[in-house]
Structure formats: structure tokens, C-alpha cells
Image (tube, rainbow, N blue to C red):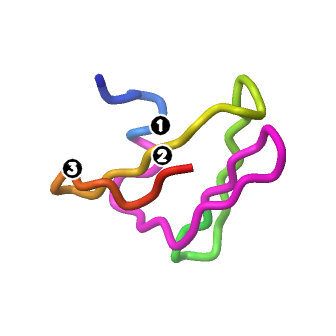
């Protein structure tokens, strides 16, 4: 999968502390205390988070 250029500049160098889902909204909590909201296309959309080694860290 190609990198999303719009998201890459926003999250580059930041650490995701936790990931939550509230209905069709995905919430990414960063270690600096900020939160990013991502509206999913459908409430049943899935998310996979990989680390730098491309190992899966989170699947929902």
C-alpha cells in the first residue's frame, strides 16, 4: 500500500499512544496529548496498524 502523503506529514515523528473507535470515527491518541479523528467510510471498516518493522501492532 502506498503511503498517504497527506497523513504522512501530520503523523511523521509522532508516537501513537492508543487507538479507539467511536462508531464511524477512529480516534488516534498521541503521546503529546493530542488526538486525531478519522471518519471511516462505513462503521464496519477495519484498521491495521504496523510498526516500523512492518509488524502488525493493532487490528480492528
User: Few, some or many C-alpha atoms within 10 Å of disc 1 (few <14, some 14-19, many ≥20)?
Assistant: few
| Magenta residue span | 9-28
Q: Nearer the viewer, residue 12 or 60?
A: 60
Q: Is residue 18 left or right of residue 16?
A: right
In the image, residue 36 sits, relative to residue 18, either above or below, namely above
Query: Which quadrant holds residue 15?
Result: bottom left
Circle nearer the N terminus (2, 3): 2
Looking at the picture, how far across and down is residue 60, in whole percent? 57, 49
Looking at the picture, how far across and down is residue 9, in whole percent? 40, 41
Residue behind mark 3: 54
Looking at the picture, how far across and down is residue 26, in whole percent? 69, 47
Circle nearer the N terminus (3, 1): 1
Residue 33 lies in the magenta-colored region: no
Residue behind mark 2: 10
Residue 13 lies in the magenta-colored region: yes
**Quick one: which residue is furthest to the right in this view?**
23
* Distance of label 2 from label 3 (alpha carbons): 19 Å
Looking at the picture, how far across and down is residue 17, in whole percent? 51, 73
Residue behind mark 1: 7
Query: Which quadrant holds residue 35?
Result: bottom right
Amino acid at each position: 500500500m502506498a503511503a498517504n502523503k497527506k497523513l504522512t506529514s501530520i503523523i511523521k515523528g509522532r508516537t501513537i499512544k492508543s487507538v479507539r473507535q467511536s462508531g464511524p470515527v477512529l480516534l488516534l491518541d498521541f503521546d503529546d496529548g493530542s488526538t486525531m479523528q478519522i471518519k471511516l467510510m462505513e462503521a464496519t471498516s477495519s484498521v491495521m496498524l504496523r510498526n516500523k518493522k512492518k509488524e502488525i501492532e493493532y487490528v480492528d
